[in-house]
Amino acid sequence: MASVTSLSDSVQQQLASALSATLPEAAGADPLLRRSDRADYQANGILALAKKAKANPRELATQVVSQVATGAVIQDIEVSGPGFLNITVSDRAITDNLAARYADETGRLGVPFAAHPGTTVIDYAQPNVAKEMHVGHLRSAVIGDSVVQLLEFTGETVVRRHHIGDWGTQFGMLIQYLDEHPHELDHKTSTEDTAASGEEAMSNLDRLYKTARKLFDSDEEFKTRARRRVVDLQAGDPHTLAVWQKFVDESKIYFFSVFEKLDMEVRDPDIVGESGYNDMLAETCRLLEESGVAVRSEGALCVFFDDIKGPEGNPVPLIVQKSDGGYGYAATDLSAIRDRVFNLKASTLLYVVDARQALHFRMVFETARRAGWLNDDVTAVQLAFGTVLGKDGKPFKTRAGETVKLQDLLDEAVDRATAVVRDKAEKVGLTEQEIEENGRYVGIGAVKYADLSTSAVRDYKFDLDQMVSLNGDTSVYLQYAYARIQSILRKAGEARPTAHPELELAPAERALGLHLDQFAETVLEVAASYEPHKLAAYLYQLASHLTTFYDQCPVLKAESPAQIENRLFLVDLTARTLHRGMSLLGIRTPDKL
């Protein structure tokens, strides 16, 4: 089905035509239309146009009004204040527009694809091999996954990249220990049980790491063997690489278990860690040095920037290759850019990484531009995010002062949510299986929504009690709104959701309908700006409009069969919009709650 033109676009087009007819030199001017409390829409663009034309803004506005045909879409238009236009659309136009969205069998609700889709390579969810994921890994995973859903929904070709930390000197110690104790990573759990297998994998890795570190610190002979093993690893020794691969494989088992708990799709081919660019590092350095982008300084290969200096005014370079010949993170990141631009044909590179890495990526992007790897046809963006804080406003830690393990945090969220679901289970008629399933949906949804409803650049407080509350701006409030609609639809009997454009709409019906009309433009704006929090805000407002609608407009006890059908149609479209919007945030919507 073709996309549905929104009411705001229809009004905008009529105003633009009226402006052009009144003031030919204003052809193509933006009427600056927005939603308003004084009417359905208000247009403010005439003030600036009148100033430019040296005309009286109120008189110009009056002339524009005379050029607007009222009826099918615009029911009423009047001049307000110094030259504002207040516009009210007809009830029929609202219902007809929503009916077109409802009839979209593709499930897109009339949302168009982006005008100029390209190929985005998005780098997100980047855990480290042989290390447990902690709360700091949450935001990159959750924000990145939502952005992927949004971009794909709007027609972008998306290539996912999970740039895991799978290379470095610490692996010498681990590889040497495992080589001497080869059964430390043997599995007891069936690999078919992803969660249990993942927990066992991390337990094995954690135990191995602690034992190897203790031996490394206390045994000089082992330390010497471990350091030699680093050289073997970097030289590509087959046996050493085989042992290293065991760590990577074991870590992936754990990663997949956590991502599955987060209800995220992570595919093995999308995991391309630091090691995936090893073969490109030498060439990257050579190209930078030969082009003069990078220079040798005290033996290291560096890129300098006029506007980046340290506290004492000394230049702070991007170190691509260390003086001992080793490669820095910059060499890997620059090699990844080359691969993503020239091999994956990316038009956009998106990095969902901590705001504290802003300087590093600023330097990497500028270096890539100087080298010609980034140009006007390729955009590189760091989608920076803030820190997860505890209730005290400080970085989130356990009572012992340790970093909170992500697995433990998610388990607690599910436990809390399951308790909330269980409290209402008898009233709703949930089975034990449904209680556990909904507990997962609500718990994981609560964690995701708390993150996604906050602007990525801001820090936010992690408060599980608030997250699973039925009141306020929470995921469960939206999930409950959806489930409540499903309950109404189940009780509707023979009545079916059917649009009745001939009916007059109550104020709460109009408000709900006009908000539903904004879904398409909201999705496109959110996808283009990589700001899921704006979609979360839209959905919360939608649920709030729905609550007002319930209070003022009985559905199953409406005055006539036609009104019952029309209100069923309104709530069903609201449910579909909530479901689609929540899915774009990576959150499930249970039918009963």
Image (tube, rainbow, N blue to C red):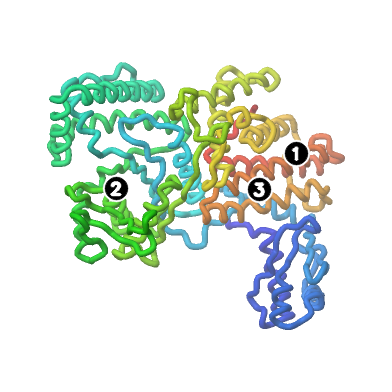
* Numbered disc in front, either 2 or 1: 2
Secondary structure state at the residue bearing disc 3? helix
Figure quadrant of the C terminus: top right
Residue 136, position in %: x, y? Answer: 44, 36
Can residue 202 be seen? yes
Residue situated furthest front in the rendering: 312
Lower sequence index among marks 3 and 2:
3
Q: Nearer the viewer, residue 282 or 158?
A: 282
* Depth order, front residue of 272/93: 272
| Residue ID for mark 2 | 329
In the rendered image, which residue does mark 3 sit on? 102
Q: What is the quadrant of residue 582 in the picture? A: top right
336 on left or right of 47: left
Task: Determine which residue is flagged by label 1.
Answer: 547
Residue type at mark 1 is Thr
421 to 34, vertically: above or below: above
Q: Name the amino acid type tagged 2.
A: Tyr
Q: Which of labels 3 and 2 is toward the front?
A: 2
**Residue drawn at 34 percent across, 63 percent down:** 369
| Residue 527 vs residue 208, the one in the foreground | 208
Please report whichever mark, 1 or 3, sits nearer to the chain's N-terminal start. Answer: 3
Q: Amino acid at mark 3?
A: Tyr
Residue 570 percent location from the top left of the image: 73, 44
